[in-house]
Image: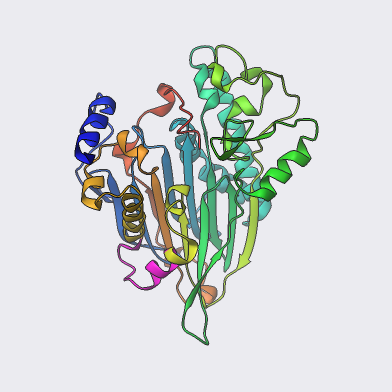
Amino acid sequence: MLSGLMNFLRACFRPRSDRYVHRNSDTSGRRDGLLWYKDHGHHFNGEFSMAVVQANNLLEDQSQLESGSLSLHESGPFGTFVGIYDGHGGPETSLFIADHLFQHLKRFTEEQQSMSVDVIRKAYQATEEGFVSIVAKQWPVKPQIAAVGSCCLVGVICSGTLYIANLGDSRAVLGRAVKATGEVLAIQLSAEHNACIESVRQELQAMHPDDSQIVVLKHNVWRVKGIIQVSRSIGDVYLKRAEFNREPLYAKFRLREPFKRPILSSEPSILVHQLQPHDQFVIFASDGLWEHLSNQEAVDIVQHHPRNGSARKLIKAALLEAAKKREMRYSDLKKIDRGVRRHFHDDITVIVVFLDSNFVSKASSSAKSPNVSIRGGGVNLRPNALAHCTTPTEAGNN
């Protein structure tokens, strides 16, 4: 019976083209069907592991790891930048962030000659403004781009300090060793902005006291205006600027009453953490992972397995849980193609950043800094997203 259902879904949802799926390995990672992975690499502060599994017809998750100089020139400061961009409604916004956010951060770091909360906040703001300008230019011919957005999680390690900035519901979790017991505890570093969290609903209601419908329980899921789950994002311009919440935007995204203040925010929550020798690693991942694994489960998997391939192990654990929830075998889930796969799990991106025990005293010199620039998924999975506009779907809109 399950086999018959799978065949039916494949027939209904089979993509017209495989131009965005390549099974060959590339210079910065390897691919196995819908899974891309870079099992092991070195960054300025230690080692890392990356993996991405695609579920949507077009990969909406984007990610990157940059290590070396964090400014425009090789004079420093030096460190590591991690970005997880969980797109919704299409890949346009997440791809735009991957192309621009780190460059903005380098520019502002160069101006201030240091890394800071202000640098990160300005980089987010410049990225948001850049995407809004894209929407304004494409609105006459591709208005649906106004309904595309992305969560945006960033981690920056610089001079013994870890900065975590977040919009949406991606998550950064620290694995910290307890000296007395030897166990490794999971500590969530990122603040989340999902309407399923009561404090987020309260924040929205406080910001919009005259709107009784600012959060709506729809199909047992809390949604902002009954449409989207996250309250902060890059993009989603139709819920930030009233001039884009009108025809020819699809009716399901248009609000009945005009709004005077933005409904969603692009202001990131930022945490500053002074790293300690007992801080072992940080797991950065899109919401697709956390739908199936708890913080501690993820930390335990990383802690109890070799570093090599740790991100891939986390994704496999999440897929095993996704298959279990549907009472199917993992081997059968792996056979389901992109597009159809979205009915079982979301795109999942994981970057595990391991921290060397001697990183605090590590000299900030370019001679000791391996220059790394890697995009999760590899270039072969990147459609020219801003040259077209996919039709946003409610299922993909977080």
Above or below, 253 relative to 170 = above
Residue at far front of view? 1
Task: Determine which quarter of the picture holds residue 316.
Answer: bottom left
Residue 344 in the image: x percent, y percent? 35, 42
Task: Determine which quarter of the picture holds residue 274.
Answer: bottom right
Above or below, 137 relative to 227 = above
Asked if residue 87 lies in the magenta stretch, the reply is no
**Left or right, 57 with reference to 14:** right
Quarter in which the N terminus is drawn: top left
Above or below, 382 relative to 352 = above
Q: Can residue 108 be seen from the camera position used here?
A: yes
Residue 371 in the image: x percent, y percent? 40, 57
Residue 393 in the image: x percent, y percent? 46, 27
Task: Determine which quarter of the picture holds residue 137.
Answer: top right
Bounds of the magenta span?
298-310
Q: Can residue 18 be seen from the camera position used here?
A: no
Q: Residue at x 42, y 42 (%)?
A: 62
